[in-house]
Image: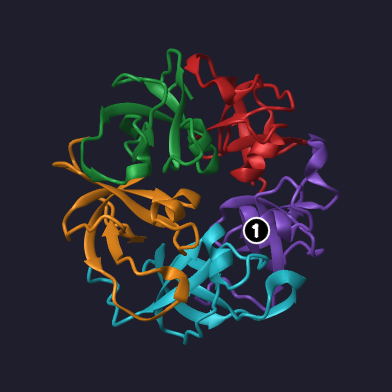
Chain colours: A green, B orange, C red, D cyan, E purple
Amino acid sequence: MQILQVRQQLVLTSRLDDMGHLPIKVLTTASGEVFVAMDPIGTKNGDWVFTIANSAARDAAGDKRYLTDLTVGGIIDDWQPDQM
Amino acid sequence: MQILQVRQQLVLTSRLDDMGHLPIKVLTTASGEVFVAMDPIGTKNGDWVFTIANSAARDAAGDKRYLTDLTVGGIIDDWQPDQM
Amino acid sequence: MQILQVRQQLVLTSRLDDMGHLPIKVLTTASGEVFVAMDPIGTKNGDWVFTIANSAARDAAGDKRYLTDLTVGGIIDDWQPDQM
Amino acid sequence: MQILQVRQQLVLTSRLDDMGHLPIKVLTTASGEVFVAMDPIGTKNGDWVFTIANSAARDAAGDKRYLTDLTVGGIIDDWQPDQM
Amino acid sequence: MQILQVRQQLVLTSRLDDMGHLPIKVLTTASGEVFVAMDPIGTKNGDWVFTIANSAARDAAGDKRYLTDLTVGGIIDDWQPDQM
């Protein structure tokens, strides 16, 4: 699992039917790498979260049929990215 | 999931039978890394899209038997790669 | 599998129900890259461990339903990260 | 999926029984990173191909029991690695 | 699949029950990146091998229940890492 910061919701002009109705968020690592994840938790921009990848991501989104490889798993309390 | 830009369709001289009939596209990250993905959406060159990897990629292509590890999931509206 | 050092327990303000009750730990590689893993072993901060990824991570956590892509598999005896 | 160039067949002194009888090839990315893949297509050294990873790689090799995480999916017509 | 060199057996003070009884080896890439893999082949330190990742790794270890994401698949004959 990875630690990422929520940056914005993704606005899509077309998408697959089986994406479900969860918001899709753009997130970045502390070093600026960009990822996209489903958000079943209801995060706000700026939140630090951890994300779950691959097959567990589909169950984490709430339905094994959802088409995702990355899902937000939880919001981290008071994370300082350079505390490591 | 990742954000990639569609660059061109891939022209193949031979390929496996179970690839299905979807177009196969070459895509790049903002920093130039190259990927190949199935495209069930009908993207145009230059479109910014997000891609779904691994087991969900097969369902995203429309049939669990399709031989893919990366599939286009949606077209992003008005993406600026350096807005992050 | 990877070799990582346990740094701290992750404090979460909200998380998915199916994470189970195992502690979730922050770990770093020898070069400082950050990961998050479930810990069914009971590691202490500073321990060097190896981690198991993806589908095996769920079984390693003790229950296939657990939402994880990375789980601690064992504590390494007397590891010197720069001995390689 | 990735774009790789076939470099040579791999010569093995011992290997697992369930690898099947397909040739195993060494391939490199345009930047020189080395991978190993099963080749059900019959590529020649120097061919540019795309490769399929993870669970789809096993089906791509022709039998779900084959022990592979990377399989050649097709030969690319007239690929120029620096055309991107 | 990847090409790695076997460096040493991993000595563990505690580990999960379902790891099975195969030796667990530390391996490095030609550029020094460190991985851990199960070894059903009986490699010696210094051997160059290729490794199988993710779901195929579990079957490669000889039992789908084994908790591994990386398993040695074969010993490479006379590999020169800088021959590529």
- Above or below, B50 against D57 in this view is above
State the image coordinates of residue C38 (x, y, percent, origin top left): 63, 29
Is E7 situated left or right of B8 in this image? right
State the image coordinates of residue E20 (x, y, percent, origin top left): 83, 47
Q: How many marks?
A: 1
Question: Which picture quadrant has residue A81?
Answer: top left
Mark 1 Cα-neighbour bin, 10 Å: few <14, some 14–19, many ≥20: many
- Above or below, A12 against E9 in this view is above
For residue C33, say whether it is visible.
Answer: no
Question: Which picture quadrant has residue B38?
Answer: bottom left
Q: Amino acid at mark 1?
A: Ala
Q: Nearer the viewer, residue A70 or A12?
A: A12
> On the image, numbered disc 1 is attached to which residue?
E56
**Chain of residue at mark 1:** E
| Residue depicted at 29% across the width and 76% down the height | B11
- Above or below, E62 against A68 in this view is below
Question: Which picture quadrant has residue B27?
Answer: bottom left
| Residue depicted at 18% across the width and 36% down the height | B83
| Residue depicted at 54% across the width and 38% down the height | A56
Q: Nearer the viewer, residue C79 or C67?
A: C67
For residue E65, say whether it is visible.
Answer: yes
Secondary structure state at the residue bearing disc 1: helix
Is A5 situated left or right of C84 in this image? left
Is C20 situated left or right of B65 in this image? right
State the image coordinates of residue A74 (x, y, percent, origin top left): 47, 22
| Residue depicted at 53% across the width and 73% down the height | E82
State the image coordinates of residue E41 (x, y, percent, origin top left): 79, 65
Q: Nearer the viewer, residue E34 or D51?
A: D51
